[in-house]
Each structure stands twice: as structure tokens, then as C-alpha cells.
Amino acid sequence: MLPTPSGRPSEGVVFLHGISRSFRSLIKLQQAVDKAGFATRNIGYPSREKPLSVLVDDIHPAIAPFTEANDGCTHFVCHSMGGLLARAYIARYRPARLGRVIMLGTPNGGSEIADRLKGRLLYRLYFGPAGQQLVTSRDAATEALLPPVDYPVGVIAGNHSLDPVASRFMLPGADDGRVTVERTKLDGMADHVVIPASHAFMMKHRAAIAQTIAFLKDGRFARPWRRVLHRSIRWPHTRLR
């Protein structure tokens, strides 16, 4: 987006990484979105240390001034649990000029892997309280954090797995190794697309990057998705904003 007459960017994009990841996992995607003309803010947060309700308050001080610095809409691009965090954040601190939300591999309907492992000590120690909120049957408190969406949401799901054991014995149907395609879907979403990518690396996949930019600009994904691969995407060496 071109700067407005005020000299401030017209639209901005907030990036939220998934559980056990960091802002670095989204740098390649951020750089592409930055090159497309959006102001960007890539936020790191302690994903394994706190529940979603507390993480929402943790990220607010970084997001609030960013939304004020842009004259136009603020969009969100999120990987995995970052999508749930964005939903909870918008429910509590909805930006006055909220734009679109893109979720990559977000377990909107939970994950059967979390169902199977939530009671195990190593899982609880590693993934912390937020890991307990990734199950398919959420408690009332978690459900209250994630009300129905009334804003444009685009969901990108993957159907390639790097974990054949989880895919065969824990995840029913097409999946990305952590979340089934079906459980990425969200009631009220504006669009949904499936790409040949795994959960861990989908945010770096060329199709995911191109589809993210398509939804940010048009509010829908490109169809057929393969045609976005013919677009030229260059990876600039930009600093984080």
C-alpha cells in the first residue's frame, strides 16, 4: 500500500507466530508482505509460558501503537496457535480499523494430537498452559476467548506431513502433520485453501506466501492456487519493523 498524504502507511500487518516458535519463523513471509507495500510488525511472545488470556495482554503494548501509526486498516497474519491468539486479541482489543486475518495451519477446531498428549508430563512441561488449549473439546473459559468471527478470515491449510506416525494414528483425514485440514476451518471464514505444505514449514512455502498477499489485497485466495506460483516474488533484505 502506498503512503497516504499524511506520510504514514495506509495499511499494516501484524504477524503472530505459533507455539514453540519465534518471530524468526515468519521473517521470510514478513519480507514478502513488506515488499508488497504493507507496513509490518512481527511480534515475538512467550508462547509456551502462559495461557492465551494472558498472552493477549502481553502482545497488546506492541500492537496498539502500530495500529495508531497507520492511517488505514490493520491486518493479521498468523501461523498455527498465532491464529487463536489473534482471535482472542481481536475479541478483547479490537483495532478501530480492523482489516483481514490470514491463518496458516491454525487449529481452529483443535488438534487430535493435543487430545492424545495433553495429560502427559513432557507435553505439559514443554507446551505449557497454552498447549492445553489446543484440544478439540475446549473448556468454557477458552471458548469465551474465541467468539464467532465477524471480520474477513482466510485460512490456509497444508496437506503434506513430515510426521507419518501422527498422520496415520492420531490425525483422521488429510493433515499437515499437526492439524487436519478439516480442523483448520472456521465458521464464518471468507475463504479456505489447501496447499502441499507441512505444518512446520508452510509459512515459508511459496504458495502460502503468494496466497497470503492475495488475500491481504483482494479478500480472497487465488484460484487455481497454482497460478500464484507463476508470479515473481523476490525476497528483499529488510529490517524488522
Image (spheres, grey):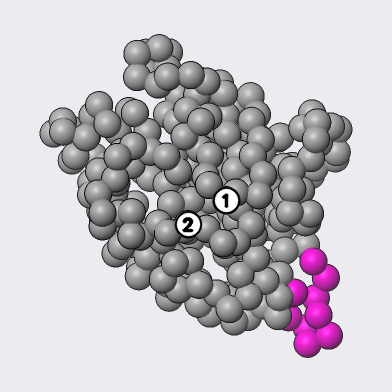
Residue designated by label 1: 188
* Rendered location of residue 236, percent (x, y): 74, 51
Q: Which residues are magenta?
A: 1-10
User: Is 6 inside the magenta-drawn segment?
Assistant: yes
User: Is 230 inside the magenta-drawn segment?
Assistant: no
* N-terminal-most mark, 2 or 1: 2
Number of marks in picture: 2
Under circle 2, the secondary element is loop
- The amino acid pointed to by label 2 is Pro
* Rendered location of residue 196, percent (x, y): 63, 24
* Residue occupying the point 43% across, 52% down: 84
> Neighbour class for label 1 at 10 Å: few (<14), some, many (≥20)?
few
Query: Cβ–Cβ below 8 Å for labels 2 and 1?
Result: yes
Q: Is residue 44 visible?
A: no
* Residue occupying the point 60% across, 43% down: 155
Q: Is residue 127 visible?
A: yes
* Rendered location of residue 120, percent (x, y): 16, 30
* Residue occupying the point 64% across, 30% down: 194
Q: How far apart, in angstroms, are the residues tagged by discs 2 and 1?
A: 7 Å
Residue 89 lies left or right of residue 4; in this view the side is: left
* Residue occupying the point 61% across, 70% down: 98
Kindly identify which numbered label has been placed on residue 148.
Answer: 2
